[in-house]
Image (cartoon, grey):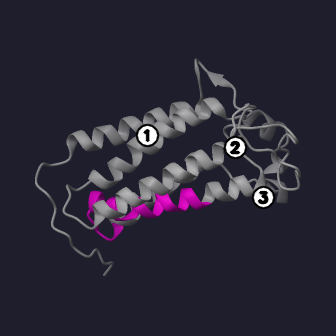
């Protein structure tokens, strides 16, 4: 979030420590990348198998996002572009976010939420069966990043373009590449199901 609005925060660094910034809730990709790095450090500290542990985390990340996007919809943030589709939505109040009122908008929050619920269901099922180490987290990154890249075309935000895409879309493409690389590189032998415990 700070990187997206860096010029504004450089002009007034005090904004970082305001209630308004705290209520902004940040940007998902920033939280995901920070959590990813932190998880790798913790897994290394406790000598946990990296790919297998990430596989266990993946369904929880997906359902957390699905619920989070319902929150975005309820708050009126992260809204979509105007549309004339029968499933378009109209917001009547802007208490939580400065969403355009009385205009028919793409419910992009619900698009993303629905896909994440579906991804959760698939990943949860995968975790209960034999699978290759890294396969579950890979199958989280590939579909989610693809959908997020597409949804950004229907969403209104203040990000400036970097070339043909927004910064969020470039991050989505990077995570898509990471997920695809993991799926291509995972071993061919299925991993046995086992409980991962911190000693």
User: Which mark, by number, is residue 175?
Assistant: 1
> Crowding near pointer 3: few (<14 within 10 Å), some, many (20+)?
few
Quarter occupied by residue 101: top right
SS state under label 3 = helix
In this view of the protein, which residue sits in the foreground, 123 or 137?
123
Q: Residue furthest left?
A: 189
Q: Position of residue 175 (x, y in %)?
A: 43, 40
In the rendered image, the vertical position of residue 66 relative to residue 90, given as above or below: below
Tell me which numbered mark, 2 or 3, is placed earlier along the sequence.
Answer: 2
- The picture places residue 167, in percent across and down from the top left corner, at 59, 31
Q: What residue is at 64 percent from the left and 32 percent from the top?
A: 154
Magenta span has 56?
yes
Q: Which residues are magenta?
A: 45-67
> Which mark is nearer the camera, 2 or 3?
3
Give the residue displayed 73% in from the left and 37% down from the top: 6
Sequence order check, earlier mark of 2 and 1: 2
Q: Secondary structure at mark 1?
A: helix
Q: Which residue is mark 2?
A: 2
Magenta span includes 10:
no
Q: Position of residue 72 (x, y in %)?
A: 70, 53
Residue at 69% over, 26% down: 160
Which residue in the rendered view is the most extreme toward the top? 163
Looking at marks 1 and 3 on the same chain, the residue that comes earlier in the sequence is marked by: 3
Q: Is residue 174 left or right of residue 90?
A: left
The answer to whether 18 appears left or right of 85 in the picture is right
Marks 2/3: CA–CA distance: 14 Å
Q: Crowding at label 1, few (<14), some or many (≥20) Cα neighbours within 10 Å?
A: many
- Horizontal and vertical percent position of residue 39: 42, 61
Residue 106: name its quadrant.
top right
């Amino acid at each position: 979030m700070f990187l997206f609005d860096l010029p504004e925060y450089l002009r007034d660094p005090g904004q970082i420590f305001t209630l308004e910034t705290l209520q902004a809730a940040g940007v998902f990709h920033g939280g995901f990348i920070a959590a990813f790095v932190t998880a790798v450090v913790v897994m290394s500290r406790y000598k946990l198998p990296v790919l297998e542990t990430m596989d266990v985390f993946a369904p929880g990340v997906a359902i957390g996002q699905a619920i989070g996007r319902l929150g975005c919809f309820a708050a009126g943030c992260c809204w979509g572009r105007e549309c004339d589709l029968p499933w378009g939505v109209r917001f009547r109040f802007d208490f939580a976010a400065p969403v355009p009122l009385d205009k028919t908008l793409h419910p992009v929050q619900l698009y993303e939420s629905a896909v994440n619920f579906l991804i959760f269901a698939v990943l949860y099922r995968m975790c209960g069966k034999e699978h290759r180490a890294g396969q579950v987290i890979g199958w989280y990154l590939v579909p989610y990043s693809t959908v997020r890249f597409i949804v950004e075309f229907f969403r209104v935000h203040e990000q400036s373009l970097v070339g043909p895409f927004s910064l969020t879309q470039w991050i989505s493409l990077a995570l898509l590449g990471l997920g695809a690389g993991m799926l291509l590189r995972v071993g061919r032998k299925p991993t046995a199901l086992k409980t991962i415990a911190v000693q």
